[in-house]
């Protein structure tokens, strides 16, 4: 690997490729609709910058079209083997240099994507974003995170308390921020056909809709969460989309 390739790996990512990953301050934080990102997750939470598997893979291809990875261990069928904690350890080779990474997740696809991004970080890919996440994790473990403090109590000159005026109920429908985020997620996942998009939404929430505007906030959050997995729609999702699109044709 030469100096030019090493620098290209560490170049900052364009803002359009950087997403926001919510990290609740506590593992058991109650879930709700986030006013900042429109997602449905534990609150309160900090939103960390991150790059997905597709953006990371694109960076590796730009620097070395022949990059590759291999698992550190395989099972009796020759498939990548996980350790006792469910982690996947890999060797990532870029421009003749090999470094080790580790990933985890609920499926093989997620584990692979996470491990590649972790190993790519060893080459400097999105290192600045990983550093922010590590610092936040350390603060959370030490109990020194920046969880918002409750406002200090105040009193009037007459020492009477006021009953706060209740906020009007917010509409339950999908928000403009969620629509924008969902559209970006669909585009990143390669879902460009309207029929496929509606079929994917139906697959994620368990009911048919005529338009994304028919979604509730909670349903929109579920679709966004599904699209934000490192590898996007699974093979089962694509099969379901094809079947549903065929039924509606």
Image (cartoon, helix red, strand yellow):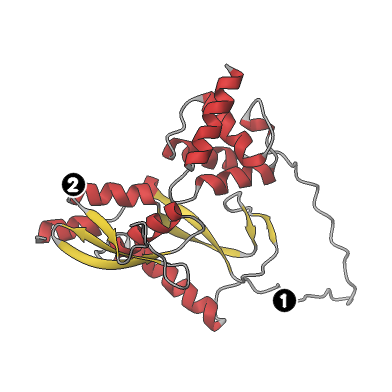
Q: Nearer the viewer, residue 177 or 9?
A: 9
> What element does badge 2 sit on?
loop
**Disc 2 marks which residue?**
65
Residue lying at the far front in this picture: please name it.
Answer: 76
Q: Nearer the viewer, mark 2 or mark 1?
A: 2
Q: Is 168 on the left or on the right of 32, as rendered?
A: right
What is the quadrant of the N terminus in the image?
A: bottom left
Residue beneath the point at 41% across and 66% down: 82
Say which residue appears at 38% left-offset and 45% top-offset. Answer: 16
Sort mark 1 into few (<14), some (14-19) or many (20+) by Cα contacts within 10 Å. Answer: few
Question: Compared to 143, does 103 lie above or below?
Answer: above
Please determine whether, in this image, residue 144 is positioned above or below residue 100: below
Residue 183 visible, this angle: no
Q: Quadrant of residue 149?
A: bottom right
Direction bottom: furthest residue: 142
Q: Is residue 2 left or right of residue 101?
A: left
First along the sequence among labels 2 and 1 = 2
Question: Which residue lies under the disc numbered 1?
Answer: 152
Q: Position of residue 80 (x, y in %)?
A: 36, 59
Tell me which corner region of the image, top left, top right, bottom left or bottom right, holds residue 216. Answer: top right
């Amino acid at each position: 690997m030469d100096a030019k390739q090493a620098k290209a790996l560490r170049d900052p990512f364009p803002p359009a490729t950087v997403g926001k990953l919510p990290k609740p301050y506590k593992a058991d934080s109650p879930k709700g609709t986030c006013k900042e990102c429109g997602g449905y997750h534990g609150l309160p939470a900090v939103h960390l910058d991150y790059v997905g598997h597709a953006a990371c893979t694109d960076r590796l291809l730009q620097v070395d079209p022949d990059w590759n990875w291999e698992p550190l261990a395989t099972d009796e069928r020759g498939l990548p083997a996980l350790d006792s904690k469910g982690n996947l350890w890999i060797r990532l080779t870029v421009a003749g240099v090999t470094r080790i990474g580790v990933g985890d997740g609920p499926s093989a696809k997620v584990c692979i994507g996470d491990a590649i991004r972790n190993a790519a970080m060893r080459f400097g890919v999105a290192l600045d974003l990983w550093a922010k996440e590590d610092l936040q994790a350390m603060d959370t473990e030490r109990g020194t995170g920046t969880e918002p403090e409750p406002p200090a109590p105040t009193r009037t000159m007459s020492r009477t308390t006021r009953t706060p005026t209740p906020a009007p109920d917010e509409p339950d429908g999908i928000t403009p921020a969620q629509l924008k985020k969902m559209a970006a997620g669909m585009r990143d996942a390669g879902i460009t056909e309207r029929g496929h998009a509606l079929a994917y939404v139906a697959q994620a929430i368990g009911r048919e809709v005529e338009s994304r505007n028919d979604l509730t906030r909670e349903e929109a959050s579920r679709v966004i969460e599904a699209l934000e997995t490192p590898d996007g729609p699974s093979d089962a999702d694509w099969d379901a989309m094809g079947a549903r699109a065929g039924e509606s044709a």
